[in-house]
Image: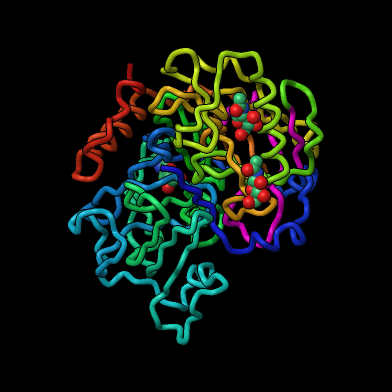
Amino acid sequence: MNRIRFIVLFFLSLSADFFLLSFSAAKHQPPTKKNSVSSRTSVILPVQGNVYPLGYYSVSLKIGNPPKVFDFDIDSGSDLTWVQCDAPCTGCTKPRDSLYKPKNNVLRCADPICSAVQYPGNQPCNSPTEQCDYKVDYADHGSSLGVLVMDSFPLKFSNGSTLGPRLAFGCGYDQEYHGTPPPTAGVIGLGNGKAGILSQLTQMGLTRNVVGHCLSERGGGYLFFGDDFVPSSGISWIPILAKPSEDYYLSGPAELYFGGKLTGLKGLDVIFDSGSSYTYLNSQSYDAVVSLVTKSLIGKPLKNATDDRSLPLCWRGNKAFKTVQEAKTFFTPLALSFTNAKKAQLQMPPESYLIVSKYGNVCLGILNGSEVGLGNLNIIGDISMQGKMVIYDNEKKQIGWGPANCDRLPNVEGEYVEDILKPSCAANNFGIAAERNCPSGLLFE
Ligand SMILES: *[C@@H]1O[C@H](CO)[C@@H](O)[C@H](O)[C@H]1NC(C)=O
Ligand SMILES: *[C@@H]1O[C@H](CO)[C@@H](O)[C@H](O)[C@H]1NC(C)=O
Ligand SMILES: *[C@@H]1O[C@H](CO)[C@@H](O)[C@H](O)[C@H]1NC(C)=O
């Protein structure tokens, strides 16, 4: 499966409208009161999934009382969290008893959160007492239509408290998919828009306005809200570009390096999007990367595998590859250098842009964004964020990344980790994701 969950609303007019928020502006924010800092903690959630063959990473979240568990595709390219809804539903992929059932908890149009989902093209509310409808359209032409509801999300915080904040989210009763429908029950949006759960948790004073993820190359990983797990050093930070909406994370300009040398490709605007399986470059950059990679393979024991349709470009070795590690020696590292941030570099070693297909060929996980309608935008997808901690800090308006072992949770007290992982892990057998493995082998050895 190959999804591009990045919300399409303003992006056609993007390049004209955004401007840069400088680091110095971020530094001059008023200092936060000390007591408010210490009373906010974090939430950490184990992640399942992989880039290939699944094409997504997901988390399980409980909703309601008694709580029911749902699995959500993790998407930093949008803000609204929604779940398949028994309203009744068209385009729901889960059995009816695994859908969310709204019960007199529909949000009204008068609610301020509702105005945050009145995207252009959405039906405007006629009266403040009407139910608040939403529709999200994703870049891969998938969409979800439904109604906003409010319910409690039992969450365990890093200080040991379990709270059930009531959060607004979408109850999606009309989904459309392009290609294979996703196996998850919904999408968890990590964007900072007002309708998102990050912004709601922040407004309630429960966590800082920071979210991050660590997606393992071996599959799985973790996701967190709040800044408790952000290392104090070793992170490269780049400013988030201001734009007409806060629903996703845009940065740039960046220039592209191939094998440590400048390619001449520069001025790239990039979206960090955990909702995209692969990385997308605009047509010009894509063409250049394909020709550089192709040239670099001359004389190496790799042949075009045009019969392998796993991805547009695949190569066959002398014998079938089992892992990317076996194939990576033939490939050259890429890097994106962000020119407005002391040349912070996002390293993309071969394992950040290659997969090994089920036929044992190695395939390019960088795709032509122009071909799928992304225009001039570039997307850093899951494949290029694997093996790194990626942090979206909306307080300091910056995106950061650093090396991390995503197979293990970051330093937290052992007790808390076991506590939080075990129930959530067991929850996977709750008729929802029975086919998926619990990540315990990786996380508690
Ligand atoms: C733990 O953190 C939560 C969320 O920030 C807060 O509401 C709660 O009061 C804290 N609990 C304790 C025991 O400090
Ligand atoms: C392999 O594919 C690339 C990209 O489509 C092309 O440029 C190249 O000429 C092909 N090589 C061979 C040997 O067919
Ligand atoms: C990328 O997509 C654009 C737009 O569809 C197309 O013109 C271009 O030829 C594509 N590049 C390659 C290498 O396929």
Query: Does residue 295 appear left or right of residue 411 in this picture?
Result: right
Tell me where residue 50 sits by quadrant: top left
Q: Can residue 32 be seen by looking at this rendering?
A: no
Viewer-nearest residue: 419 or 339 = 339
Q: How is the image coloured?
A: rainbow
Q: Nearer the viewer, residue 341 or 296?
A: 296
- 189 left or right of 429 in image: right
Residue 174 relative to residue 271: left or right: left
As for residue 238 lying within the magenta part, the answer is yes
Quadrant containing the C terminus is top left
Q: Is residue 158 magenta?
A: no
Is 223 in front, or is 338?
338
Residue 403 visible somewhere in the drawing:
yes
Residue 246: % across, % down = 61, 57
Q: Residue at x 55, y 44 (%)?
A: 273
Asked if 260 appears above or below 159 in the picture, the reply is above
Above or below, comparing residue 369 to residue 84 in the picture: above
Quarter of the image holding residue 244? bottom right
Residue 362 placement (x, y as % from top left): 50, 24
Which residue of the protein is positioned furthest toward the bottom in this rendering? 126
Residue 195 locus on image (x, y percent): 49, 62
Count of numbered tags: 0
Query: Where in the figure is residue 166, as x and y percent of width and height?
Result: 37, 59
Seen at 40% across and 42% down, the residue is: 1
- Asked where in the image residue 262 lies, by quadrant, the reply is top right
In the image, the segment drawn in magenta is: 230-257
Q: Residue at x 77, y 61 (%)?
A: 16
